[in-house]
Image (cartoon, rainbow, N blue to C red):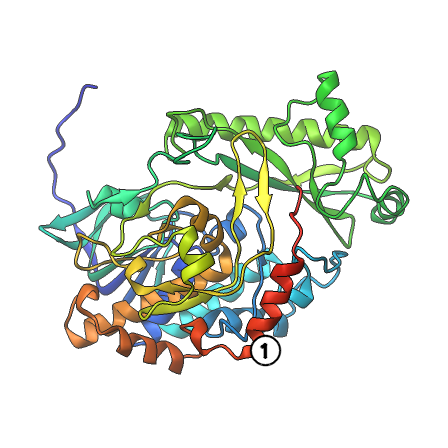
């Protein structure tokens, strides 16, 4: 590969105590916690709104929110969504043994209201938000980061800070800084070894006669199940060559007003391809739009109620699945979350089981797990003294990533990282040297539970019963 040499001065436009890179669930928790704990905080987001996967990929839900084991910012967000009228109440889903439904803490919300609410919460906290700011490089000095370099329509500029938090979703800041990362190769074993999970995709359709569709689905429940809508229709259309889809069923959530959220398109990355590569991303975007169009045309032709419907909205970007993750002082593993459970340095409790999407279109999910701890060491870089991570960038193996990546635990790890960053600045130590007991106390004071050891027996028994009754979910 040829190269060019760039020589120019980059102006430093902002100096902060803490810079948070990425405005998804992890970045939301981190920026709010950092600012509320008194740190001068800047949140950098490459798109024009906060929410990350929840708003950009139309994944507008929080799964398995349970005030008994989480609390803190995640509960505040859900409560404020409800009080502001942002929770969608017309979802027809029924609770089943896989755990989905409002009684199990699954909250579907209005994505546009959520964007507005997050703007309000950030302003209240004092955090400074910069949209349309894509971090392209880090400023590394030895084993410390002085800050990050941003590209924008305004031009190239730098933001300096005492602590940097990687909430990019793909460990981009750790990777671009030259710090050790994991996750480069995707699956480590099995028939998918060397492949990543690929991209997911959902879209909104409008103009649906929802009553007709629901009546049809009620008469053909085996075909139009909650998580396997249209399986026979899609499978036959695949065999006939009418559609080129990786997955043979869809997830459909009807809304009032003739709208529906539809999840099906999925793009496979070949062995050796990586989800952050521009050619892979471009090919994926094009193919996912094609898949959405073919699927929707099939529904228009074959499904009562869809005849006059149209594709109303496609996501701003596909759902980016596994990629780089920070190499932390501990790598959380599937063995840990199923067997070890508790850690002395835990900063959040997670109740999410692994939700694995395979490159061949397969899927594995069962609500067969009880709450487990996420240790602080998973948020702390092994090499960079002042680099933390939250959300999907946390140090964990791929199976555990498939659980902890979810929106709810991401807000919790974000709150922990943001609190740790602010405390580090206040106490004039690096995040590596921060006393974890001080961090745990601060999180507890802010309402966030920090270890499953403190959970009441009846809560653990409830989860144990659910795990014993769990059946695999087939999507």
Say whether residue 279 is left or right of residue 265: left
- Camera-side residue: 372 or 213? 372
Query: In this picture, is 438 found above or below 121?
Result: below
Residue labelled with disc 1 = 458
The residue under the point 27% across, 44% down is 181
Q: Within 10 Å of the Cα at label 1, are there few (<14), some (14-19), or many (20+) other Cα atoms?
A: few
Q: Is residue 400 above or below residue 319?
A: below
Q: Is residue 76 above or below residue 432?
A: below
Instruction: Give the vertical position of 439 relative to 385 (above or below).
Output: below
In this rendered view, identify the residue nearer to me: 193 or 271. Answer: 193
Q: Where on the picture, by quarter, is residue 373? A: bottom left
User: Furthest residue to the bottom?
Assistant: 445
Residue 376 image-quadrant placement: bottom left
Front residue of 156 and 33:
33
Residue 154 appears in view: no
Q: Position of residue 214 (x, y in %)?
A: 85, 48
Image quadrant holding the N terminus, namely: top left
Residue at x 36% of width, y 60% of height: 129
419 vs 353, left or right, is: left
Asked whether, in this view, residue 117 is left or right of residue 205, the answer is left
Q: Position of residue 113 (x, y in %)?
A: 58, 61
Q: Where does the image place residue 405, in percent across and percent down from the top left?
A: 45, 52
**Residue located at (48% from left, 56% from top):** 51
Q: Position of residue 131 (x, y in %)?
A: 38, 53
Residue 185 appearing in the image: yes
């Amino acid at each position: 590969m040829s190269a060019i040499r760039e020589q120019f001065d980059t102006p430093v436009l902002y100096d902060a105590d803490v810079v948070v890179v990425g405005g998804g669930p992890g970045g939301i928790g981190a920026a709010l916690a950092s600012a509320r704990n008194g740190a001068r905080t800047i949140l950098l987001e490459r798109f024009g709104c906060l929410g990350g996967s929840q708003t950009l990929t139309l994944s507008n839900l929080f799964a398995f929110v349970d005030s008994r084991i989480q609390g803190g910012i995640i509960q505040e967000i859900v409560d404020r969504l409800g009080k502001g009228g942002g929770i969608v109440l017309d979802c027809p889903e029924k609770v089943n043994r896989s755990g989905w439904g409002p009684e199990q803490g699954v909250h579907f919300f209005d994505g546009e209201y959520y964007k507005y609410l997050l703007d309000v919460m950030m302003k209240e906290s004092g955090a400074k938000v910069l949209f349309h700011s894509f971090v392209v490089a880090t400023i590394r000095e030895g084993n410390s980061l002085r800050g990050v370099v941003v590209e924008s329509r305004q031009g190239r500029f730098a933001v300096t800070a005492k602590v940097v938090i990687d909430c990019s979703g793909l460990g981009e800041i750790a990777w671009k800084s030259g710090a050790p990362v994991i996750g480069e190769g995707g699956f480590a074993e099995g028939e998918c070894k060397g492949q990543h999970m690929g991209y997911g995709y959902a879209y909104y359709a409008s103009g649906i006669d929802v009553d007709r569709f629901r009546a049809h689905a009620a008469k053909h429940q085996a075909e139009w199940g909650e998580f396997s809508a249209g399986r026979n229709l899609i499978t036959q259309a695949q065999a006939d060559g009418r559609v080129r889809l990786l997955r043979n069923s869809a997830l459909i959530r009807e809304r009032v007003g003739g709208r529906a959220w539809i999840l099906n398109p999925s793009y496979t990355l070949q062995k050796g391809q990586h989800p952050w590569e521009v050619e892979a991303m471009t090919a994926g975007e094009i193919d996912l739009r094609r898949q959405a169009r073919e699927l929707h045309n099939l529904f228009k032709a074959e499904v009562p109620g869809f005849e006059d419907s149209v594709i109303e909205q496609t996501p701003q970007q596909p759902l980016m699945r596994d990629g780089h993750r920070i190499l932390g002082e501990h790598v959380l593993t599937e063995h840990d979350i199923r067997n070890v459970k508790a850690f002395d340095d835990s900063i959040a409790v997670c109740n999410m089981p692994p939700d694995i999407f395979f490159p061949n279109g397969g899927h594995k999910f069962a609500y067969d797990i009880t709450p487990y701890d996420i240790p602080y060491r998973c948020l702390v870089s092994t090499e960079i003294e002042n680099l933390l991570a939250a959300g999907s960038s946390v140090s964990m193996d791929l199976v555990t990533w498939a659980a902890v990546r979810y929106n709810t635990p991401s807000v919790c790890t974000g709150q922990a990282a943001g609190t740790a960053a602010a405390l580090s600045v206040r106490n004039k130590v690096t995040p590596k040297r921060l006393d974890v007991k001080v961090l745990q106390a601060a999180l507890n004071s802010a309402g966030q539970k920090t270890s499953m050891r403190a959970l009441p027996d009846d809560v653990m028994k409830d989860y144990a019963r659910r795990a014993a009754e769990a059946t695999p979910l087939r999507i």
